Image: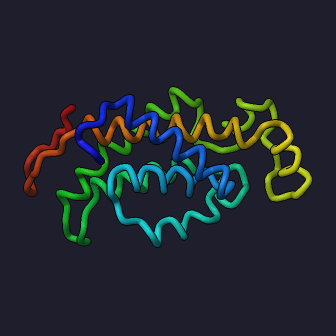
Amino acid sequence: MESSLSKEDVFSRLDQKVSAYLKLSGNCAQATFMALSEQFGLDGGQVFKALTPFPGLVFRGYFCGTAVACVLVMGLKFGREKPDDWTGYIRAIPPVKAFYQRFEREVGSILCSEVLDDLFGDDFESMEPAETKRWLEAGGMEKCTITATKAARIAAEIIMDHKHKSIKRGQTYTFDK
């Protein structure tokens, strides 16, 4: 990320990237992940591929793909490098917890079916081609872009605002703004 950019500039860039990638791919999880990874200089090539089935967790209405993507970005940013790195493990928990709390407060749910129901009054059975067509005709791409950009902004703000401290086993850990 360019340190000279204001938060609003970062948010504007993310909005543009998420929107463009979502139009290109039709995949909220991949679009959000790609935009955030690029913004924060994270390497997530294999993660991008793994997010292929994630819209609504294989189109079943389960976890919101864009929320999952944001959590994976925060894992890359704050997480551990080795299985026995407890500092990295503990460091990754507070930003993810903060993300989910804020996402649920601002979006209403982390479940894709509930997010869709709030946006459209319908949760769409995305596995069926007729339902996908109906979702598109109802403005699905545009409405889901709103949720994806909101999620990317929440994740970006947490990444930009939080500083982590290094800790050792047995010490208390705090995650300060």
Q: Is residue 88 left or right of residue 65?
A: left
Q: Is residue 156 left or right of residue 162?
A: right
Picture quarter with the C terminus: top left
Q: Residue at x 17, y 39 (%)?
A: 174
Coloring scheme of the render? Answer: rainbow
- Rendered view: 161 above or below 91: above
Q: Is residue 5 left or right of residue 44?
A: left
Q: How many marks?
A: 0
Q: Where does the image place residue 12, in percent across and percent down from the top left?
A: 46, 34
- Rendered view: 69 above or below 140: below
Asked whether 64 or 8 is in front, the reply is 8
Residue 134 sits in quarter: top right
Q: Where does the image place residue 107, in percent across and percent down from the top left?
A: 57, 31
Q: Residue at x 62, y 43 (%)?
A: 111
Asked whether 26 or 173 is in front, the reply is 26
Q: Residue at x 86, y 41 (%)?
A: 137
Q: Where does the image place residue 105, in percent across and percent down from the top left?
A: 51, 27
Q: Where does the image place residue 127, in percent across and percent down from the top left?
A: 81, 58
Q: Residue at x 92, y 53 (%)?
A: 130
